[in-house]
Amino acid sequence: MTSAYAVFPYDPASWPDGLRRIARPGVLERWGAVDRSPHAPRLVAVPDGGGDGDGHGWAAAALVTARPGTAYVKIVDAVGDVPAAAGAVVSYAGERGLVQVVWEGWTVSAEDAVASGFAPLRPPLTREGPGAGGPGAGYVRWLVAEDVAEPAYYRQSTDFTCAAVTALVARAQAGAERWESLDRAAELTLWRDATNFPACEPVGLGVAVRRRWPTASVEVFLDTDEPVLLDHLSGSEREWRAVLQQASRADARRTGVPVDGRRLSLAEVREAVGRRERQVLLLVSLTTMQGFDVPHWVLCHGVVPGAVVLEDPWCNAAAGESWVDAHLLPVPDASLDAMSLLGEDRVRGAVLIGPG
């Protein structure tokens, strides 16, 4: 591993000469094909022995990006001396206190990635549908002590089925659902049972999980008695969805799903997930990670020092993301605490699932 590196701006309109000398045109074309600016793109370069440090004489380089508010960095590609580039990114990440480096498998071989200390990720279950493309392989290197079981990655096939997907992935990881049964029919069927049209609110989701897996332990945390996820609606459009949420609470009482009216703390999330007793479906806003305030369900399934590990069933291909960004995603406790307070009243919604 090398620690000698320099960081340069990402500017597809004016690639540094040092990069052009070591990168194939097709690679640079892919790097500049999308607007990566929401995810802080930059070039980590390794100067060669004759370089003067101003962008000339590069031995290696990597394009790196990351979602805001997270604790990882992603290597999109490495060119030139690939092991040197990977080592430079690992040093870059470590010096910034990040916990993970991931690597998209566009051009790197599995042998080269493993030789650089990276482990192969499980292939995603879905490679079709909007935004579900990306590299066929990915790799991860943890920079902290970790004991995180890796689920398979499944990308939601619509813009509104995140809750259903997180529940299905949670149950598959727990052994209550076969991975091969996760498909669009299963996703939409569970969404139909949980939806408040089109979003899934916490109580309705908890009830749907209980109906789908009646032997599972299900508990809902929601620190308000008022309807949620309706701030953008008014009049009759808000009113009939509020009625449905009241019906969900009645269903919860009837089916024995407890609804705790206090705010679930991040310490409790860490404790539940860290002991592997329960998985946590957590409602978050995408403002920090994606730049738009949309409620979204993620699965909290692991913990590492300083961060909670998520499965996010959605990725933003328009900003250069792929499934590699959304899989085994570490989010610092403080960031997750802030992004999981939603709406004008800043409420937190969660569904905890455990063995029966």
Image: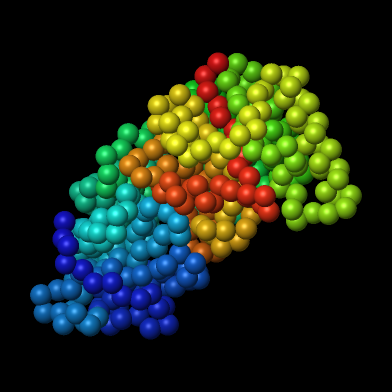
Q: Is residue 250 visible?
A: yes
Residue furthest left in the image: 49
On screen, residue 156 above or below 270: below
Picture layout, residue 355 above or below residue 105: above
Q: Is residue 223 left or right of residue 271?
A: right
Q: Position of residue 277 (x, y in %)?
A: 45, 24
- The number of callouts visible is 0
Q: Position of residue 108 (x, y in %)?
A: 30, 56
> For residue 309, which quarter of the picture?
top left
Assign the N terminus to one quadrant of the image: bottom left
Give the left or right position of residue 336, taking residue 43 as reference: right
**Residue closest to the eye, 186 or 291:** 291
120 left or right of 292 in image: left
Which residue appears at 24% of the width and 81% of the height? Answer: 55
Residue at far right of view: 236
- Viewer-closest of 248 and 58: 248
Give the residue displayed 45% in from the left and 56% down from the top: 69
Q: Which quarter of the rendering shows the C terminus? A: top right
Q: Position of residue 251 (x, y in %)?
A: 76, 25
